[in-house]
Amino acid sequence: MPMGTRRIAACKKTVENGGSRYRFYCELSGALACVTDPIRAETPEEELRIAWETVGIKYFNLCHKCGRWVIDAAYNVDVLECVECAPYEAEPRFCKNCGVKIETPGRKCPVCGNSLVYEGGGTSE
């Protein structure tokens, strides 16, 4: 979602009596990362800026290759890129789809059933 010339993570807005509440989502997995308290500002753009800069950005990493905002579980910190741009070179510790910690390596996530990606895009044996 654009904010002026800067990009922010995907979000949805709900309007309440106390202001607008923003929900920010990982742009790779779609996982909900955070929800703001109600925010009031003079314009919708200002509300969004406040929500992103005071709450949202704390929960995300910016992929230095594709520019997506992703949660920690979908971020390869060794190369500062999302796991789609730079898959883990070893078995991942977290499912990139739902973020659950992987205790026992396998071909599928034990929670969501998503294929676990290894070594540049292949699956574990």
Image (cartoon, grey):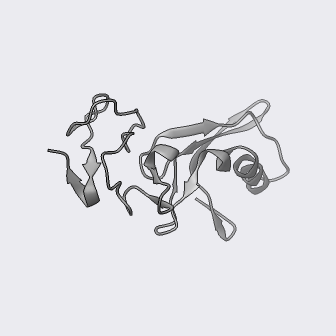
Image quadrant containing the N terminus:
bottom right
Whole-percent x, y for residue 67 in the image: 52, 65
What number of labels is visible?
Answer: 0
Whole-percent x, y for residue 39 in the image: 78, 40
Which residue: 31% across, 28% down?
111
| Residue 78 higher or lower than 38, as above or below | below
| Residue 12 higher or lower than 109, as above or below | below
Whole-percent x, y for residue 97 in the image: 37, 42
Whole-percent x, y for residue 3 in the image: 67, 62
Which residue: 35% across, 54% down?
88
* 46 on left or right of 83: right
* 56 on left or right of 46: left
Which residue: 28% across, 31% down?
104
* 25 on left or right of 106: right
| Residue 6 higher or lower than 1, as above or below | below
Image quadrant containing the C terminus:
top left
* 78 on left or right of 6: left
| Residue 125 higher or lower than 112, as above or below | below
Residue farthest right in this picture: 42
Task: Depth check: give the residue in front, 25 or 109.
Answer: 109
Which residue: 69% across, 37% down?
36
